[in-house]
Image (spheres, rainbow, N blue to C red):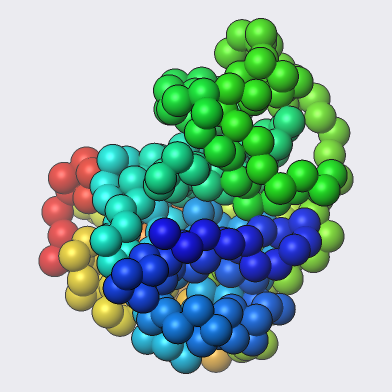
Amino acid sequence: MLFRELNRGKCKTYIIACEKKRKAVLVDPIKEKVDRYLASLAYFGCELTSIIDTHTHADHRTASWEIHDITGAPVVMHRQAPAPHVAIHVEDGQSIAVGDVRLRVFHTPGHTPDSISIYTAGRVLTGDTLLIHGTGRCDFAGGNAGEQYDSITQKLFSLPNETLVFPAHDYRGHTHSTIGEEKQTNPRVAGRTRPAYVELMANLGLPLPQGIQESLQPNQSAIEDESIHFPTLSELNQVRQLTAQEVHTFQISAHPPLVLDVREPEEFTGELGHISGSLLIPLKELPSRSHEIDAYKTRDIVVVCRAGVRSTTAAAILTGLGFEHVSNLKGGMLDWSDQRLPVE
């Protein structure tokens, strides 16, 4: 097996390849390094079979969509990932084949709901869940310190002590650690109870990552151009959130809302289906097509997407355009489907 870190910087991108069959996967590629990745694949003589993002990144733009456009390799993310154009959604315990090499997926939420770690051949790529002598922050939307503690202590720490740890970021010049070392010396986790960890993470007082507005929402939506002006975090936090059951009750009431689906057309007719009577306007087209729903400026609108993330962006955009009663389906069609509510 071929294993390399390609960036040599604070953000880490890994290539894992089957040397016998010359098949490779890239994990957490960043937009600024696409040429380096393509050159590395050519140098090693490998065909790219998939691109994995361990989570939705907030501090840099992913290169997954661009590399997919160039190579045709499918993008792989967890089922909870909000972005469109993810060809393969994985869950805990699944295996990804790279030639004769097998990658085992651990769902390790906490930093984000869609965080995964990848184990293969005595190594685990931990994304932003477990860092070297640290852990990823949990104060973004969907972050949960308790879930992160469980992901680390119950899943990652169940691996053999000699397992090498390769995170998606490192800010101190480290290249790797081991599970045993992190169990014993990680200052955020070692000897700390779950409640104590939750309290610690709630009081870190970290500034927002530089460029979060230029990274997070484009990564969530896979929108690469300037077709929309993304709302601020403050505007996103003001969007009213409704549960799937609340939306269902609202929908069958005497005065049902307009259900506006902002996914891509292939998602609208895909495996999750869509809510009966919903109107499809993809997020990218919403600013230029909002006039189509002007009749609902003072009426109720519920916005829908896959995981409730792109639709929160859409709801904030509509509010900024003067629509007065806009809500979001929290958890999106994933929650709607999990609760077995009706779809077309």
Q: Is residue 14 or residue 200 the one in the foreground? A: 14
Foreground: 19 or 116?
A: 19
Image spot of residue 234 (x, y percent): 74, 54
Instruction: For the C terminus, give its image quadrant.
Output: bottom left
- Image quadrant of residue 111? top right
Q: Quadrant of residue 30?
A: bottom right
Residue 130 pos. (x, y %): 61, 36
Left or right position of 205 against 181: right
Residue at 72 percent across and 32 percent down: it is: 134
Q: Residue at x 47, y 63 (%)?
A: 2
At 65% from the left edge and 36% from the top edge, which residue is drawn?
177
Q: How many marks on residues?
A: 0
Please state which of residues 105 and 280 is positioned toward the viewer in this rendering: 105
Q: Residue at x 51, y 33 (%)?
A: 163
Classify residue 246 as left or right of residue 51.
left
**Could you tell me if residue 54 is visible in this image?**
yes
- Viewed as shown, does residue 37 lie left or right of 150? right
Residue 326 visible in the displayed image: no
Question: 267 above or below 8?
Answer: below
Looking at the image, is 150 positioned above or below residue 215?
above
* Quadrant holding the N terminus: bottom left
- Above or below: residue 249 compared with residue 28: above
